[in-house]
Amino acid sequence: MISKPYPSSSRPIPDFGDALIVAVGKARSGSMVVTFDQKFAAKLKALGINIYTFEK
């Protein structure tokens, strides 16, 4: 069995801008990220960052 290099909640964020948002969100307690991107929102949620998403 081949193991994955990262657990699903800690996979790297491929976009540099998104990675900066994640870093700030983790560093600032009580922060919230607002996004339209559902995939990014799922990653933020998995990392324990508060999110607000806009629904269509």
Image (cartoon, helix red, strand yellow):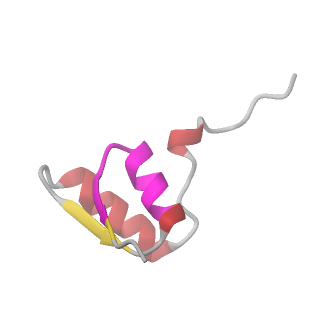
Residue occupying the point 21% across, 53% down? 27
Residue 37 part of the magenta-drawn span: no
Q: Position of residue 14 (x, y in %)?
A: 58, 66
State the residue at coordinates (48%, 63%): 40
The C terminus, quarter of image: bottom left
Q: Is residue 32 left or right of residue 10?
A: left
Image quarter in which the N terminus is found: top right
Image-based side of 17 in relation to 30, left or right: right
Q: Is residue 14 left or right of residue 52?
A: right
Pick the front one: 56 or 33: 56
Q: Nearer the viewer, residue 9 or 55?
A: 55
Residue positioned most to the top: 1
- In the image, residue 30 sits, relative to residue 14, either above or below, namely above
Q: Which residues are magenta?
A: 40-52
Rendered image quadrant of residue 6: top right
Name which residue lies at 44% across and 44% down: 46
